[in-house]
């Protein structure tokens, strides 16, 4: 395996571990008492929203890269020109490998962003459900 692929795999593994930790924290917050879990969930929601905001530029760049990769594949660029020298063929293959690695990294960035969006949606749903349950239990309006 090339050094670049090895480095990419290590980076992806680190990001996956981070996602796993965030999902575990989300699960554990659901088991807390209502008042504590409400505060913890709101704090976690704030952190997720900030992370999404902080990574918005990287996500936009990744989206452009993924779209470019897909457009390139659809256009039939894969067939490429007929190359006369071995050096030219090797250079083309290196370029294709670099492009594939860039695509893999961009696709993973989008998957990470989608996971953050999903976590945010779950937190919002849990908070809304808690608010509705509390209102039903107390028989009063808890808006505000």
Image (cartoon, rainbow, N blue to C red):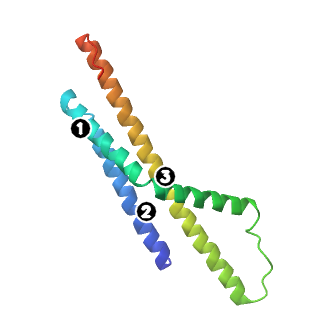
Which residue is at 41% across, 66% downward? 11
Residue designated by label 1: 40
User: Of helix, strand and loop, which one carries label 2?
Assistant: helix
The reply to whether discs 1 and 2 touch (Cβ–Cβ < 8 Å) is no
Q: Quadrant of the C terminus?
A: top left
Local packing at callout 1 (Cα closer than 10 Å; few below 14, some 14-19, many 20+) is: some
Q: Which mark is residue 9?
A: none
Query: What residue sits 68% from the left and 79% below the top?
Result: 92
In the figure, residue 31 lies in which quadrant? Answer: top left
Q: Please identify the residue farthest to the top as the structure is shown.
A: 139
Q: Do the residues labelled 3 and 1 touch (CB within 8 Å)?
A: no
Alpha carbons under labels 1 and 2: distance apart: 28 Å
* Residue denoted by label 3: 111
* Total residue callouts: 3
Dot 3 crowding, Cα within 10 Å, few <14, some 14–19, many 20+: few
User: Closer to the camera: disc 3 or disc 1?
Assistant: 1
Residue at point 19% right, 33% down? 36
x and y, in percent, of residue 91 in the image = 66, 83
Is 5 in front, or is 47? 47
Report the side of 38 relative to 9 (left or right): left
> Mark 2 — residue?
12
Vertical relation: 130 (above or below) 61: above
In this rendering, is residue 126 above or below 6?
Answer: above
Q: Which is nearer the eye, 82 or 45?
A: 45
Foreground residue among 69 and 94 = 69
Mark 1 or mark 2, which has the lower sequence index? 2
Q: Where is residue 60 in the image (x, y as percent from the top left)?
A: 52, 55
- Residue 95, percent across and down? 63, 76
């Amino acid at each position: 395996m090339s050094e670049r692929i090895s480095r990419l795999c290590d980076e992806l593994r680190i990001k996956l571990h981070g996602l796993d930790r965030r999902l575990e924290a989300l699960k554990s917050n659901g088991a807390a008492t209502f008042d504590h879990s409400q505060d913890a969930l709101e704090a976690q929601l704030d952190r997720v929203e900030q992370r999404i905001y902080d990574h918005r530029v990287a996500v936009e760049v990744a989206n452009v890269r993924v779209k470019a990769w897909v457009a390139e594949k659809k256009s039939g660029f894969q067939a490429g020109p007929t190359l006369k020298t071995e050096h030219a063929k090797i250079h083309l293959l290196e370029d294709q490998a670099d492009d594939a690695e860039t695509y893999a990294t961009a696709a993973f960035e989008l998957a990470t962003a989608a996971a953050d969006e999903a976590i945010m949606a779950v937190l919002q749903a849990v908070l809304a459900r808690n608010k509705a349950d509390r209102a039903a239990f107390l028989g009063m309006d808890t808006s505000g």
